[in-house]
Image (spheres, helix red, strand yellow):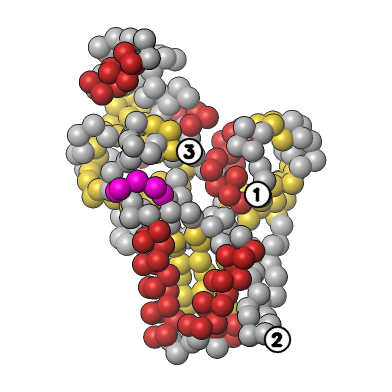
């Protein structure tokens, strides 16, 4: 698989009808598949959430094996989540975890989270313990689920290839939930777990070595990330998560209202922003996880 920089930058111009053209920021590498491989393999190789690859590349089947010569956009330069740049920040909406040290971004990794009905909770918590080669004690709910399918689990699953916690676990002051490795890497970048936060084994190993006990962990749902400065607006959006804990479309609506307020405070045109949003919905290129930009001139 060959990687090369692809400047996916278009001019941002006011259209004659008052609309504003979209522009991709130079945030995406374009990769060429050199031999047949699965989309899951590409996601692991590039460190991009599997679901994000599907969102950024139209018409891809998540189970696809990609043919040699296929070009993919890789959304690999995300904006940081809002709030304190402190410790671990898990953004469920984009399926990534960020690690900040001394107000600087140290690492960002893809994650798997709880499936619908087993939603990973929003929380502000701490790391209470870091385990290498953890044992897994399935809770009663998972034992019941297995029994319903005619299966059984031992009381304790010892370390090894059958252990769903993988090689390391970061335990939280949040009963029943942790960040851990996996024996099913194809689930990283998707909503498939029973609620825990799943990482590739090579990534959880890095966190286990570098994240001290007591580190703050914020689990947030931020489907729209953005920044407005002297150059213009950057916006990165994901389709809202379903589930009672996540507020659905309201989380997107609240973020867009925040952007409108910031645009108005700078004396720029909210109407132009709304026109651009409508154009992006028509073009179906807003909720891709790729960063889009609008210049100050386009918002004036």
Query: Which element carries disc 2, helix, strand or loop?
Result: loop
- Give the quarter of the figure containing the C terminus: bottom right
In this picture, residue 29 sits left or right of residue 184: right
Q: Position of residue 121 (x, y in %)?
A: 28, 44
Query: Which stretch appears magenta?
Result: 241-245
Distance from Cα at disc 1 to Cα at disc 2? 29 Å
Q: Image height check: is 145 above or below 296? A: above
Mark 2 vs mark 3, foreground winner is 2
Mark 3, residue position: 190
Q: Are marks 1 and 2 in contact (CB under 8 Å)?
A: no
How far from the left and from the top, in percent, is residue 41?
Answer: 61, 32
Is 21 situated above or below 183?
Answer: below
Residue for badge 2: 16
Residue 99 picture location, percent across and down: 38, 48
Q: Residues within 10 Å of mark 2 (few under 14, many from 20)?
A: few
- Which quarter of the image is occupied by the N terminus? top right
Q: Which mark is residue 201?
A: none
Q: Residue at x 61, y 71 (%)?
A: 279
Classify mark 3: residues with Cα within 10 Å, few (<14), some (14-19) or many (20+). many
Asked whether residue 209 appears in the rendered view, the answer is no
According to the picture, the residue beneath numbered tag 1 turns out to be 57
Give percent across and percent down for residue 296.
55, 83
Q: Is residue 110 above or below residue 247?
A: above
Frontmost residue, 206 versus 7: 7
- Total number of numbered labels? 3
Label pair 1/3, CB-CB below 8 angstroms = no
Q: Residue furthest right?
A: 69
Going from N to C along the chain, the mark reached first, 1 or 2, is 2
């Amino acid at each position: 698989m060959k990687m090369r920089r692809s400047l996916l930058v278009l001019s941002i111009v006011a259209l004659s009808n008052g609309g504003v053209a979209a522009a991709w920021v130079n945030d995406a590498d374009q990769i060429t598949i050199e031999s047949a491989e699965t989309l899951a393999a590409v996601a692991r190789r590039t460190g991009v959430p599997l679901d994000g690859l599907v969102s950024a590349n139209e018409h891809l089947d998540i189970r696809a094996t990609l043919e040699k010569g296929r070009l993919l956009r890789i959304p690999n330069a995300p904006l940081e989540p809002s709030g304190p740049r402190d410790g671990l920040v898990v953004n469920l909406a984009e399926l990534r975890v960020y690690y900040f040290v001394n107000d600087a971004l140290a690492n960002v990794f893809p994650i798997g989270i709880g499936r619908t009905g087993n939603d990973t909770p929003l929380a502000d918590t701490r790391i209470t313990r870091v385990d290498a080669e953890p044992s897994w004690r399935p809770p009663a709910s998972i034992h019941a689920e297995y029994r319903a399918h005619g299966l059984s689990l031992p009381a304790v699953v010892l370390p090894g290839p059958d252990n769903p916690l993988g090689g390391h676990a970061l335990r939280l002051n949040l009963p029943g939930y942790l960040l851990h490795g996996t024996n099913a890497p194809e689930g990283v970048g998707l909503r498939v777990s029973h609620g825990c936060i799943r990482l590739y084994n090579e990534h959880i190993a890095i966190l286990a070595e570098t994240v001290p006990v007591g580190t703050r962990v914020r689990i947030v749902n931020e489907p729209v990330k953005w920044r407005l400065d002297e150059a213009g607006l950057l916006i990165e959006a994901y389709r809202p998560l379903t589930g009672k804990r996540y507020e659905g479309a309201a989380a997107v609506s609240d973020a867009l209202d925040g952007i409108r307020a910031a645009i108005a405070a700078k004396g720029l045109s909210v109407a132009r922003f709304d026109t651009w949003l409508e154009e992006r919905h028509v073009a179906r290129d807003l909720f891709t996880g790729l960063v889009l930009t609008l210049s100050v001139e386009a918002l004036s």
